[in-house]
Amino acid sequence: MGLGSVGKIDIRAISESMQPVTEAWFNATIEIINPKIGTGTFDRVTNRRTGRTQEVLWTGPARIQAMRWPNVATSRQEAVSSRTVVFHIPISEDVPPHFIQEGYRVHVLDGGMQPEFETGLYVITSTVNGSYAWDRRIECMMDQGAVIE
């Protein structure tokens, strides 16, 4: 028999019916930020960059998922504490895939049942989804050694 005898599977219809189900699990609130790291003026006397104003591009609900144990050393045995964290957000017309770029940041406003997520530094590395998308995935590297207040 096999799957070929079932007929054509309507993946889009399944995705559309599953979107509200997955969105019910979004218990956090995040912002997607363009840090505008290439703007501003560097002052050599104070060793600071001024005139750089980051831009909040989107604010909304999310589910936060830490993916694996943190990397605790590099090949040179330098102490690091970075890990992959995935943010799941709704599929929405106001957040097209090309809108979220590598290097942008995620700021967690409400970590849901894990408030420690609220002080993390998250740098976006990818927004690749599967072809069977129920939500949008934003993959980030989290520096567990950095605390953002």
Image: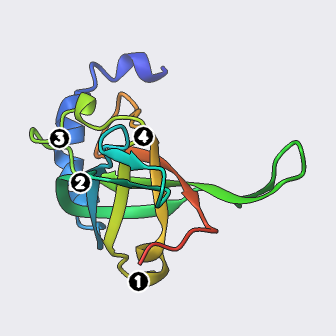
Answer left or right for 98 relative to 128.
Answer: left
**Mark 4 or mark 3: whose residue is earlier in sequence:** 3
**Mark 1 or mark 2: whose residue is earlier in sequence:** 2
Nearer the camera: disc 2 or disc 3: 2
**Mark 2 or mark 4: whose residue is earlier in sequence:** 2
Separation of disc 2 and disc 4 at Cα? 15 Å
Disc 1 target residue: 113
Residue at image location 23% in from the left, 67% down from the top: 24
Residue 53 drawn above or below residue 2: below
Quadrant location, the C terminus: bottom left
Tell me if label 4 and label 3 are in contact, CB under 8 Å.
no
Residue positioned most to the left: 93
Three-letter amino acid code at the position of disc 2: Thr
Three-letter amino acid code at the position of disc 4: Gly
Answer left or right for 43 relative to 57.
Answer: right
Three-letter amino acid code at the position of disc 1: Met
Judged from the image, the secondary structure of the residue bearing numbered disc 3 is: loop
Pointer 3 local density, CA inside 10 Å: few below 14, some 14–19, many at least 20: some
